[in-house]
Image: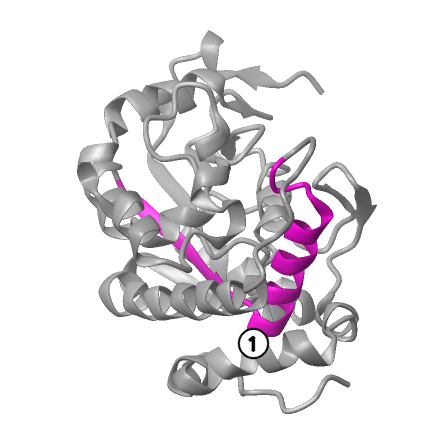
Amino acid sequence: MALALGCRHDVESRVGTHLFGISANNSGSTFLKAALATSRATWNLDWEGQGMLGYVGPNILLPRLANRLWAAEQRWIDLLTDPRNYDWPRTRKAWYFQAFARDPDASVFYTKTPAHLLLVDELARHFHNAKFLFMVRNPYAVCEGICRFHRSGRAHGRSPPPPPENLPELAARHAVTCMAWQRRNLEAHGQRGVFFTYEAMCAEPERVARDIRVLAPELDDLDLRQRLRVKAWYHEMLTDMNARQIARLGAEDLAAFNRVFRRHEDVLAHFGYAVMDAAP
């Protein structure tokens, strides 16, 4: 099927809904993005919004923002939440130009960028009919994925520096801070979106897809139960990877995570998670 390209169509006049995926990195949002791109109702981007040419704002992929640890320190949060660092009209124009759709009459523009979890107020202010897909995931699985990524060296490309000695603590601080911001997002903008956990998306994909269709009725062909390419590494059906990832945790990492999580048990409990005393 030939795709419609934004550079050849007036995307601005077609889009009636701007839909944003709002979740921390390592939370399952890449699969969700791939599923939404199969809908004939959506305009999509090849990469996360921050990775597109013409995006005007701090790029969390840069090493100076510690890549997947951008909520671990207040100085990074301050940079990411300063509205002076963004130009949304220019960014929107760049996104539209590079978007693709299965149908040129698609009316929903979708994108996701993990750090936009900190910017829901701004997105609601600058994008017409902004709606949100709010998602969280078991923080132990999130932290395991972050630590594995940074230890692999992929965070910095060739000749990577060694990961910071306090990487597990930074990962836990990042995860719990993202959850705290997500709770704030739901309190302020819950009526503009739908909330679900990664675990619910994996266990009940039909229900979650139905909830998304209630939020955005244009997505009447959305299907979360399909085999999709994820991060160019593998094709698979939607699968809960939590147990597999948590089983990789060593005692030292788990202890470091728990030193942070025990100080924020209320945040974990708000989303139905609890401090885990020992790895299975």
**Kind of residue indicated by mark 1:** Phe
Element assignment for label 1: helix
Q: Position of residue 90 (x, y in %)?
A: 28, 20
Residue drawn at the location 38% of the way across and 86% of the way down: 266
Could you tell me how many numbered marks the image carries?
Answer: 1
For residue 46, above or below residue 193: above
* Residue 151 among magenta residues: yes
Q: Quadrant of the C terminus?
A: bottom right
Is residue 78 found left or right of 50 in the rendered image?
Answer: left
**Can I make out residue 49 in this image?**
yes
Residue drawn at the location 78% of the way across and 54% of the way down: 237
For residue 145, above or below residue 111: below
**Can I make out residue 138 in this image?**
no
Q: Which residues are magenta?
A: 129-156
Q: Which residue is mark 1?
A: 257
**Which quarter of the picture shows residue 247?**
bottom right
Q: Position of residue 203 (x, y in %)?
A: 68, 71
Is residue 220 found left or right of 130 in the rendered image?
Answer: right
Q: Position of residue 174 (x, y in %)?
A: 46, 63
Residue 78 versus residue 242: which sits nearer the camera?
A: 78
Q: Quadrant of the N terminus?
A: top right
Q: Position of residue 173 (x, y in %)?
A: 45, 68
Residue drawn at the location 26% of the way across and 29% of the way down: 88
Is residue 266 found left or right of 24 in the rendered image?
Answer: left
Residue 108 versus residue 268: which sits nearer the camera?
A: 268
For residue 85, above or below residue 155: above
**Which quarter of the picture shows residue 258?**
bottom right
Residue drawn at the location 38% of the way across and 25% of the way down: 55
Residue 229 versus residue 218: which sits nearer the camera?
A: 229
* Residue 252 among magenta residues: no
Residue 105 versus residue 18: which sits nearer the camera?
A: 18
Q: Residues within 10 Å of mark 1 (few under 14, many from 20)?
A: many
